Amino acid sequence: MILFIEKTNPGQTVWIREDDLRHLFALRPDIGDTLRLSDGTDHTYTGKIEKITKKEIAVQIETKEKIQRPAQKIRLCTALLKGDKNEFVIQKATELGADEILFFASRRCVAKAEGKEQAKRARFEKAAKLAAMQCGADTVPVIGDLITFDEMKQQLQPENTAFFYEKATLLYSRFLPRLKTAPQITLVTGPEGGFSPEEAEQLQAKGILPLSLGKRILRAETAPICAIAVLLASLGRM
């Protein structure tokens, strides 16, 4: 397990409290134990437990090391899903190594978020942090604000975007070689009802080719995980 803290330096003392404390207590920590920590973006640390109480654990930072990031960043743009499917996608995408996760409102989205955007983002960020802690990831993916389909579309570039559409005929595997030199790769997946024909046409009008993940129609929460895993395998990261 890894714990996430604010940026610090060797010699400083950090305090583990609240949710992180409960997770750490499950490991039965003791004075003198060495912990692995990260600021989530730039550095990892090792620290030694110097004090334990019921409300907090004091850790003295001993080492600091720069995080070595992969050459290519992976950004997942996925339509907002219903129920806890969003958290499932966040958890698995975090475990696989996504750098950024962005949710957008598509025409056929079942879930609605009007008036609940900030609460959802806070919940999503917590899910990403917890998943990173449990899998030992050095970084936590950035969770973007919920945006519209049109806002998402404006951010896409044909040369580094993989857009998945159930009516596509071009296999993802044949498109992958084009992505291998892109500094950032964006994967776009749709809602439970799929993209509307109009949305698919708008993306194609930007020069973004629709891609297929195979003959089987994958669930909306399965498609993004499959897309990331196949990409990582092609990049030699799995």
Image (tube, rainbow, N blue to C red):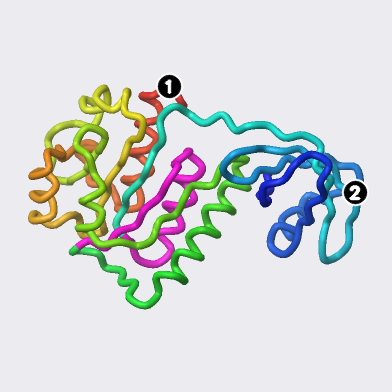
Quarter containing the N terminus: top right
Find residue 194 and report its horizontal and vertical position in percent. Answer: 20, 55
- Front residue of 205 and 164: 205
Q: Secondary structure at mark 1?
A: loop
Q: CA distance from mark 1 to mark 2?
A: 40 Å
Residue on which the image places disc 1:
236
- Is 42 left or right of 52, judged from the image as shown? left
Q: Above or below — where is 174 with respect to 102?
A: above
Instruction: Specify the label residue 50 is tagged with.
Output: 2
* CA neighbours of label 2 inside 10 A, class few (<14), some (14 to 19), many (20+): some
- For the residue carrying disc 1, how many other residues have a C-alpha within 10 Å: few (<14), some (14-19), or many (20+)? few
Q: Is residue 233 above or below residue 186?
A: above
What span is in magenta? 80-106
> Which element type, helix, strand or loop, lies under badge 2?
strand
82 over 7 or under it: above or below: below
- Name which residue lies at 45% across and 64% down: 121
The quarter of the picture where residue 68 lies is top right
* Near-viewer residue (39 or 231): 39
Identify the residue shown where x is 27% and y is 46%: 188
- Relative horizontal placement of residue 144, taking residue 41 as reference (left or right): left
Q: Per the image, is 108 magenta? A: no
CB under 8 Å between discs 1 and 2: no
Q: How far across and down, in percent of the image, does residue 16 sit? A: 76, 56
User: Mark 2: which amino acid?
Assistant: Glu
Question: In the rendered structure, which amino acid carries the disc numbered 1?
Answer: Gly
